[in-house]
Image: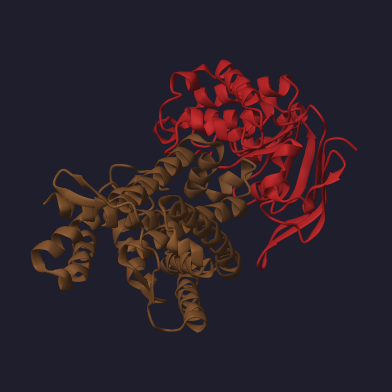
Chain colours: A red, B brown
Amino acid sequence: MSGLVVEDVDVYYGRVHALRSLSFHVDQGEIVALLGNNGAGKTTTMNLISGLVKPSSGSVTWDGTDLRSVPAHDLVPRGVVHVPEGRRIFSTMTVHENLMLGGYRVRDTSVIDERVERVYALMPRLLERRRQQGGTLSGGEQQMLAIGRALVADPRLLLLDEPSMGLAPLIVKQVMEIIAEVNAQGTTVLLVEQNAKAALRIADRAYVVETGRVTLSGAADELAGDARVVEAYLGS
Amino acid sequence: MSQIIINGLFVGSFYALIALGYSMVYGIIKLLNFAHGDVYMIGAFVGFVLLTSFGGLAAAATIPTLVLLVLVAMIFTGLLGVTVERVAYRPLRSSPRLAVLITAVGMSFTLEYAVRQIFGPSPKAYPVRVSGGSVEFIGARISTAQLVLMALAALLMVVLAFYVNRTREGRAMRAIALDPAASTLMGINVNRVISRVFFIGSALAGAAGVMAGAYYGSIDFLMGFVIGIKAFTAAVIGGIGNLYGAMLGGLTLGLLESFGTAWLGGEWRDVFSFACLIIFLSFKPTGILGARVVERM
């Protein structure tokens, strides 16, 4: 079974039941969006896949391997790379150093250099600011840096948690275009978003998550037209 | 005058070596490792054991043997540091910070009294009298051995600065100091890097231990206590968590002590250093470099 399959997963934080037999899948080459409000369990789902939280039951498989037994830091060599909520760039390190860290698990420095160059080609703004400290970038640039840093790890599955958070509409559009471009080059993308409109524009399929379970799923264009989604997430 | 400066720089260079370990550990896991001074003490004792068990070594204490002694002590204390972290600190990684702090104090006593149990409570004479005479340097006399040890300390610090600032592993250390969870997402094995920091910090303390034994000529199981607090002072003066701050703080404290001793007399030395600590904590708690260099490592 290729792609990502999350099946019947339950996650607890102490007594809080964060995910309730959550199931969904992402096929190779797709962009899949997880939509939902604050506290619905979207970030927990991301942390589940990247091994930062462990499920009490259910399974998470990627390309046929069970990810539950893989330590979080060993997911990168398996092609699973997580861009966390709030970007989490290394603020006092330079843009270039941040990108180099994305290639931490790559031994061959010429490969890292080549990938960093590819990121600079995709996001020329980062090249202009390569010697600047990450924390001095604007929000949009920081998001691009976070995505760029993940790309240096050469992901086959890219997990993006709220990439549009706090960004102006025009910048959101740019970031979404970059994500679509990355996907077009062959990377599978799982996109968590509160900004349903922006996410549905580039996604192939989407799931709506409420209080830890999937309540609605389907092709992105169908969901964009679904009355319940329009009412709850898109506004009229 | 120049003699005071030379003495200050010599003492300061091993304060700096110890302060570096303090500061690196604080930078990466925000722990004040109170057992760090005792690792330095054990470094001195490793040198002592080597010198006494190979009788020929003490007799032929030349400069190369001294350097060899430092290296062996560094490896031993480095591994000791890794073990201490693994046994005492790692299981408490997610506990409240106070719990780890108390554990560090406990670890300190454990090491001190283990050494007392083995070697006894009385001070041991350090059987190293390095031949090679001394040189005259801008009006100050400095022994060749002191000169070599200072050069070695400087070399260790240069290598460390290069490692932390220019290599892949150094980058990983700085990343963890900033954000451990995000570092994990980069594929960095955080525990392994923390072990490495303990190895490096403890090895530097071990080197300082041998230097101190050779300089003061006598060692005992409590020698790490005051030095540990002084290295902490040095780290605070420089800006704790900051690599260059620890080096600068060590040298500054060494010089301050040296001048304090010359002006007020040796019995005031410790009063003087801890007065400096209090002054810095009151007026500039971030240390000399703390405010300017934001990066914590």
- The residue sitting at 51% across, 22% down in the picture is A170
Residue at 43% in and 23% down: A129
Q: Position of residue A224 (x, y in %)?
A: 71, 30
Spot the residue most to the right.
Answer: A1
User: Which residue is at the front of the view, A172 or B70?
Assistant: B70
For the point 53% across and 58% down, the residue is B78
Position of B117 compared to B125: left or right? right
In this rendering, the answer to whether B96 lies above or below A176 is below
Q: Position of residue B226 (x, y in %)?
A: 32, 71
Q: Quadrant of residue B33?
A: bottom left
Q: Is residue B189 left or right of residue B229?
A: right
Name which residue lies at 55% across and 19% down.
A120
Residue B88 as seen in the image, left or right of residue A32: left
Q: Is residue A92 visible?
A: yes
Position of A73 relative to A108 (above/below): below
x, y (%) of residue A136? 39, 32
In the rendered image, residue B28, in percent from the top left (x then y), is placed at: 48, 53
Closest to the observer, B137 or B225: B137
Query: How many marks can you see?
Result: 0
